[in-house]
Image: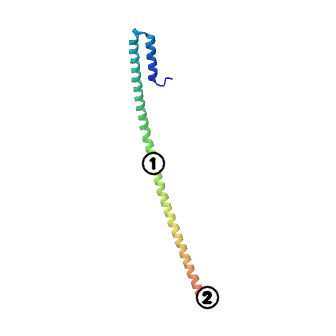
């Protein structure tokens, strides 16, 4: 029904006007406005304090998070670098093994050719 503070204050003001009468209504409204202004001032102070505290906490936690994030990134980069080196060395070994096997097969082909030549003669 009363969704906001302003709605509540309007209802309260109308109630004061109805029940207080003409002679006290001006003073009542003045006191009510003073109270409302004081409430707004305290609320704004509290919000400013909460924002300041939140910013301090955010700054305090941001530094360790940044450090951990940087360490994590450098670790990932090192792993990727090591993986690339291992992959390259594995491929080099594989190429060497294949080259050796090709040489063996070529030698075997040469032997077989020479055998077939000697057998045909």
Other-residue count near label 2 (Cα within 10 Å), few / some / many at <14 / 14–19 / ≥20: few
Residue 13, image x, y percentages = 43, 16
Q: Is residue 76 above or below residue 21?
A: below
Earlier-in-chain disc, 2 versus 1: 1
Residue topped by disc 1:
71
Q: Is residue 2 above or below residue 119?
A: above
Q: Nearer the viewer, residue 53 or 103?
A: 53
Q: Is residue 3 above or below residue 67?
A: above
Of badges 2 and 1, nearer the viewer stands 2
Quarter that holds the C terminus = bottom right
Q: Is residue 121 left or right of residue 23?
A: right
Q: Residue furthest bottom?
A: 121
User: Which residue sits at x=44%, y=47%?
Assistant: 70
User: Which residue sits at x=58%, y=87%?
Assistant: 117
What separation in Å lies between label 2 and label 1 (alpha carbons)?
Answer: 71 Å
Residue 7, image x, y percentages = 45, 22
Q: Secondary structure at mark 1?
A: helix
Q: Secondary structure at mark 2?
A: helix
Residue 23, image x, y percentages = 39, 8
Residue topped by disc 2:
119
């Amino acid at each position: 029904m009363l969704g906001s503070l302003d709605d509540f204050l309007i209802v309260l003001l109308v109630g004061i006007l109805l029940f207080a009468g003409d002679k006290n209504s001006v003073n009542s409204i003045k006191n009510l406005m003073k109270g409302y202004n004081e409430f707004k001032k305290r609320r704004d102070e509290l919000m400013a304090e909460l924002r300041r505290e939140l910013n301090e906490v955010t700054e305090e936690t941001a530094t360790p998070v940044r450090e951990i994030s940087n360490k994590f990134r450098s670790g990932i980069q090192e792993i990727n670098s090591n993986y690339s080196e291992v992959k390259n060395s594995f491929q080099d070994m594989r190429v060497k093994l294949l080259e050796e096997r090709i040489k063996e097969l070529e030698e075997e082909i040469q032997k077989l050719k020479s055998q077939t030549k000697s057998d045909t003669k």
